[in-house]
C-alpha cells in the first residue's frame, strides 16, 4: 500500500503519514485512524506504534 493510499483510507494527509513513519508525535485519533486503515484492531497498537 502506498503512503497516498494509506493517507486516503485513514482520512489524513500524506504528510501526516510521513510524520508517523518517522516516529514523530501524533494525536491518539491519528493513530486510531492509521491502525484501522491498516486493518489492525485498537488492541494491536503495539504492532504499529512503539509507545
Image: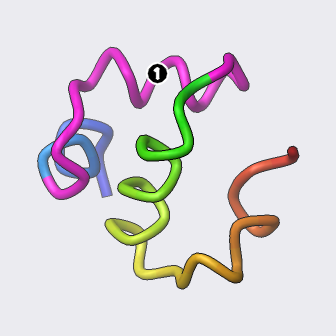
Q: Residue at x 67, y 20 (%)?
A: 25
Q: Would you name the residue on which mark 1 appears?
A: 18
SS category of the residue bearing label 1: helix
- Residue 2, position as x, y percentages in the image: 29, 46
How many numbered discs?
Answer: 1
Is 17 situated above or below 32? above
Region of the chain picked out in magenta, as a range:
9-25
Local packing at callout 1 (Cα closer than 10 Å; few below 14, some 14-19, many 20+) is some
Look at the image and name its color scheme. Answer: rainbow
- Please state the horizontal and vertical placement of residue 7, each as a whole percent of the image: 24, 41
Q: Is residue 45 left or right of residue 38?
A: right
Magenta run includes residue 18: yes
Above or below residue 39? Residue 38 is above
Quadrant where the image shows the C terminus: top right
Q: Residue at x 23, y 35 (%)?
A: 12
Q: Is residue 44 left or right of residue 3?
A: right
Residue drawn at 57 percent across, 26 percent down: 26
Q: Is residue 10 magenta?
A: yes
- In the rendered image, which quarter contains the N terminus? bottom left
Residue, far front? 28
Residue 49 at x, y percent in the picture: 74, 50
Amino acid at each position: 500500500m502506498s503512503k497516498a493510499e494509506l493517507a486516503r483510507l485513514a482520512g489524513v494527509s500524506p504528510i501526516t503519514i510521513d510524520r508517523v513513519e518517522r516516529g514523530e508525535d501524533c494525536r491518539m485519533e491519528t493513530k486510531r485512524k492509521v491502525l484501522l486503515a491498516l486493518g489492525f484492531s485498537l488492541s494491536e497498537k503495539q504492532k504499529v506504534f512503539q509507545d
